[in-house]
Image (spheres, grey):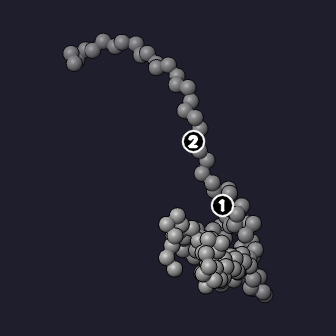
Amino acid sequence: MQPRPQDNENDLNPADTGGCSVCRDLLVNLGRFFEVLGAVRDSHRSDWLTVEDVAGELKISKSIVYRLIRSGDLEAVDLVVGDEGRIPRKGHFRIKREAFDQYLEARKVKPLPQEPARLPARRFPKVKNHLGL
């Protein structure tokens, strides 16, 4: 199908495809596909994050995430049962999304305060130069 002179090729609207039913169906199905894709992406978003998820979102290594958890900076839950008193093995931590968001909020960079009013320059008494400089 040749585009009409007044049509822009980037404007894809099923109503503007004229008599081409294949084009209309394609555009309708593409719209449905992107709706389903968005719904699937949202359904996989969990309230619990793994260490790998946090490392991926922050683009840091997993060992740094483990260090944040062990230092108490990032709140996490240990899923290993029956190992009280031992240092848990890697891979058994889960982080609530709320705790992760709070961690990020606490580390937001604050803007610099406005430049304070400058104090007048101090005048030092003149000193005799005995060296002749």
Which of the 4 image quarters holds residue 30? bottom right
Sequence order check: which comes first, mark 2 or mark 1?
A: 1
Kindly state the secondary structure of the residue where label 2 is placed: loop
Q: Which amino acid does label 1 sit on?
A: Leu
Indicate the quadrant containing the C terminus: top left, top right, bottom left or bottom right.
Answer: top left
15 or 54, nearer to the observer: 15
Question: Could you tell me which residue is drawn at 69 percent across and 83 percent down?
Answer: 92
4 or 74, nearer to the observer: 4
Q: Residue 133, relative to residue 36: is it above or below?
A: above
Question: Would you name the residue on which mark 1 appears?
Answer: 104
Question: Would you name the residue on which mark 2 appears?
Answer: 112
Q: Position of residue 35 (x, y in %)?
A: 69, 77
Q: How far separated are the C-alphas under marks 2 and 1?
A: 19 Å
In this image, 118 relative to 69: left or right? left
In this image, 68 relative to 119: left or right? right
Question: Could you tell me which residue is drawn at 71 percent across and 61 percent down?
Answer: 102
Which of the numbered marks, if any, corresponds to residue 9? none
Q: Residue 120, relative to residue 41: is it above or below?
A: above
Q: Position of residue 108 (x, y in %)?
A: 63, 54
